[in-house]
Image: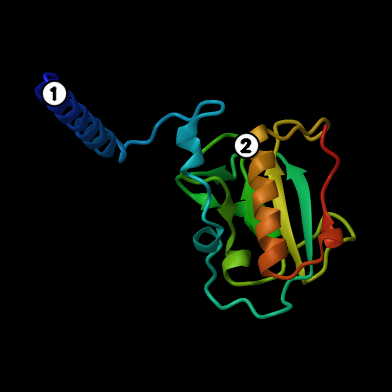
Amino acid sequence: MHHQGRLSKVMLMLVAAMTGGTLVLLALEGKPLQPMPFSLSSQGRLTDFKTALVTDIPIEAGRWRRIDVSYRTNQGRLSPQYGLTGELAQKYHIVIPDRVDMDCPFYTSSRWTKQLACLDPPNGLCDSRTIKICLITRNLRQPVSTPSQVRQLQELVNYLVKNHHIEPQLVWMPDRP
């Protein structure tokens, strides 16, 4: 019983240190941390597809039947400042950039928000009920997806398949080196 006072002081200091550490972390929460490989900070910032894929009109049941994924180069048409514009905005519903941007992991076009078919499909697999997704790559001759693009694409396709009742065999993805 001699150490009862010491134990109380240690426990009190432990609670104070934990509370102080919590307050410091809460103060830092508003500032984005740089994502690192296998970082726990990136785990808390998973995309909420329900809010990211908001549309101007409700999506009617059976509106979408297929998903078509292809590669394109950016050519200056995609920027956090201006969003998705130009040719990319006309030919794709969703574009996943090649660089990590946790605040904007993908861009949606006005064709998605207005639930319109994309213009000028590059292959014969598309029709007016196909969701077009583009992966930005630096070289079309040898397209390579970044690990963050692959993760984002998998989560996005899983969400679309589940929520829009698209048959998984109707998801066309290019071969990825």
Q: Is residue 129 above or below residue 23?
A: below
What percent of the width, then of the height, locates residue 11? Answer: 19, 28
Quadrant of the image containing the N terminus: top left
Q: Amino acid at mark 1?
A: Met
Instruction: Specify which label sits upstream in the sequence, 1 or 2.
Output: 1
Q: Is residue 74 visible?
A: no
Residue located farthest toward the bottom when viewing the structure as drawn: 60
Locate residue 16: give its quadrant.
top left
Q: Is residue 75 left or right of residue 16?
A: right
As displayed, is residue 57 above or below residue 109? below
Residue 103 lies, with reference to residue 146, above or below; the image says: below
Q: Quadrant of residue 149?
A: top right
Q: Residue tagged by mark 2?
A: 148
Q: Amino acid at mark 2?
A: Ser
Residue identified by numbered label 1: 1
What residue appears at the point 57 percent right and 52 percent down from the top-left corner? 107
Q: Residue at x 82, y 66 (%)?
A: 167
Above or below 146: residue 92 = below
Q: Name the residue at the right extreme.
A: 124
Nearer the observer, 158 or 86: 158
Query: Residue 28: where, in percent of width, then height?
Result: 28, 34
Tell me: 159 left or right of 173. left
Count neighbours of disc 1 (C-alpha within 10 A) and say few if under 14, some if 14 to 19, many if 20 or more. few
Marks 1 and 2 sit apart, C-alpha to C-alpha, by 57 Å
